[in-house]
Amino acid sequence: MTLRSPARLVVLISGSGTNLQALIDACADPAYGARVVAVGADRGGIAGLTRAEKAGIPTFVHRVKDFAERDDWNAAVTADVAAAKPDLVVSAGFLKILGESFLAEFGDRYINTHNSLLPSFAGMHGPRDAFEAGVKLAGATLFFCDAGIDTGPIIAQVAVPVVDDDTVDTLTERIKEAERRQLVDCVGRMVRDGWTVTGRKVTLGQKSEQ
């Protein structure tokens, strides 16, 4: 898939927004090839929304508990993302799973970052689970979202060695740093050079006319 330049990014968050900030900072360079046009969240009052507002980026918030049905929440998120006309939707610490209608609209351009080397240690506690398993290499994965939990086609991975004096906290912090660098690098490559997906194989830097 090949995108317009600059590509339009919608970023979904649930917390402090450090990955969002990394993308905002990268987009300040015109050569990066993208700009963040909207930020969505599943809760209000979070630091990530403040980061977006300081950068002049429109935001929207939809809390699951404010909707009678989960499908209604999913439809509201889908509508606001669609209104921003994104080329790429980035889940950057967004802690909710979006449903079928969202994936039908954006599934071929909705990416997520996870703090483990998938398919190992999927779910909410990747670094802790890796640490407790005694692995020597942890890391982070960027992937396309599908209907499963951390199961979509893998775009990129970065390894983070587990050292002898690590704790869960120190390992988590080093994974976050590597995860952030990988996210910024890969989003830039995707928007500038495109990508192809064949089955579960993702190739960056090969433009197509999809």
Image (tube, rainbow, N blue to C red):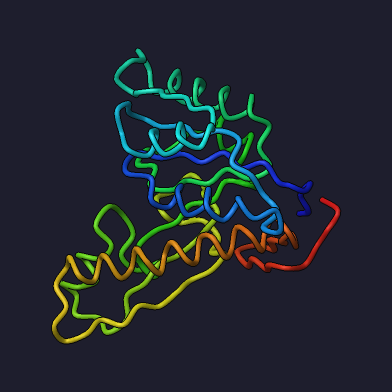
Q: Residue furthest right?
A: 209
Closer to the camera in the image, 145 or 192: 192
Instruction: Look at the picture and state if 196 lies above or below 37.
Output: below
The N terminus is located in which quarter?
bottom right
Report which quarter residue 33 is drawn in.
Answer: bottom right
Whole-percent x, y for residue 129 in the image: 21, 66
Q: Is residue 68 left or right of residue 106?
A: left
Whole-percent x, y for residue 66 in the image: 33, 15
Residue at 57% across, 38% down: 10
Report which quarter residue 63 is drawn in.
Answer: top left
Instruction: Look at the picture and state if 36 lies above or below 192.
Output: above
Q: Is residue 12 left or right of residue 3?
A: left
Instruction: Look at the picture and state if 97 lies above or below 164.
Output: above
Residue at 38% across, 51% down: 18
Residue at 66% across, 37% down: 86
Q: Residue furthest top?
A: 68
Closer to the camera in the image, 202 or 157: 157
Whole-percent x, y for residue 179 in the image: 42, 64
Whole-percent x, y for residue 93 in the image: 38, 47
Count the marks: 0
